Image (tube, grey):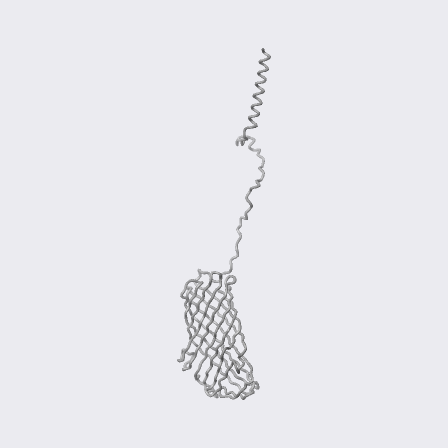
Amino acid sequence: MKLHRRRAGLLAALFATLSSAAHAQSAPATEPSPNDPRALDVAPSAPSSAAAPLVDAAPRQTERPFELNPASRFWAVRASAELGVVAVLSHTIQLSQTGSTIDYVREGGQDNVALFARVSAELELARHHNFVFLYQPIDLRSQVRVERDLLINNVSFARGTGLDLRYGFDFYRFSYAYDFFSDPNLELSIGLTFQLRNAVISFTSTDGVNRVLNNNVGLVPALKARGRYTFRSGAFMGFEVDGSYASIPGLNGSDIPVEGALLDASLRAGLKLWGPSEVFVNVRYLGGGSRGVGRDPVAPSDGYVNNWLHTMAISLGANIR
């Protein structure tokens, strides 16, 4: 009887031991408490394959184009230059009242194209007030053999004479124009122009025997209008007109009653390149003239001039604005 009891006790103890081991294997593992010495013995965890990619802490700086005229500034500066060719459509001149009327295109060698160039600088104040300075050289030179007897400023050039001709008409232009719009992409400006002309007209026989010179400097006032529209793409279209007509002293650039006229009209189209730079193509009519008797003529001239010029120019240009 005692043997049976001893066997039953051993079996019960063995069953209890097996049950405790099975329960320990099936229970979830728990983290050791901070006071548990095992908390100091933690194996490093393996890196996760789903970790976020590394990101550069310093953001990249995008390149900004150079800005010549910030919108916040009270003033702005601009510059423009053109280079192309000019063709004389019509040009006649008569020097002295008994002189020959000479057709520069048909018999004066102006039937070829010539160099065209102009430069300008501009100052804008308070977005609306524009001050412009422009320089325009004109220097037409030719050599011909005259096909008829000519009388120029009462100087005779016989038929068959070799003749060197120069028609220089450089001018300097100072303009003010008021822009009615505040939008930098839209312009309509109206103002005044004062043009200082520097005319040099000469006829010289190739043997140097006969020569006629007619030099003149004068100030001519004119009206000015200018417009431009810039698209979102940076392309733009524009026009510009300077013109006057007068036959009374002062307004004609002289203090005597001489008829005078001036017209400089252009159309252009262009596009923005980078930063403040633009390029454009321009078509321009430039013409004018005068008729009347000048002041203090020098013999043998009687001072009479009848001179009318009409030209067309095509040019490529660049703006900095």
Residue in the image at 51% along x and 85% along y? 212
**Which image quadrant is residue 251 in?**
bottom left
Residue 148 position, x and y percent, is: 53, 87
**Which image quadrant is residue 189 in?**
bottom left
Residue in the image at 56% along x and 31% along y? 38
Callout count: 0
Tell me the quadrant of the picture where the N terminus can be found. Answer: top right
**Which image quadrant is residue 7 in?**
top right
Work out which residue is located at the far top of the displayed protein and give it.
1
In-front residue for pair 141/74? 141
Residue in the image at 51% along x and 57% along y? 64
Residue 290 position, x and y percent, is: 44, 80
Residue 310 position, x and y percent, is: 48, 77
Work out which residue is located at the far left of the displayed protein and give it.
248
Residue in the image at 42% along x and 70% along y? 225
Residue 139 position, x and y percent, is: 52, 77
In-front residue for pair 62/236? 236
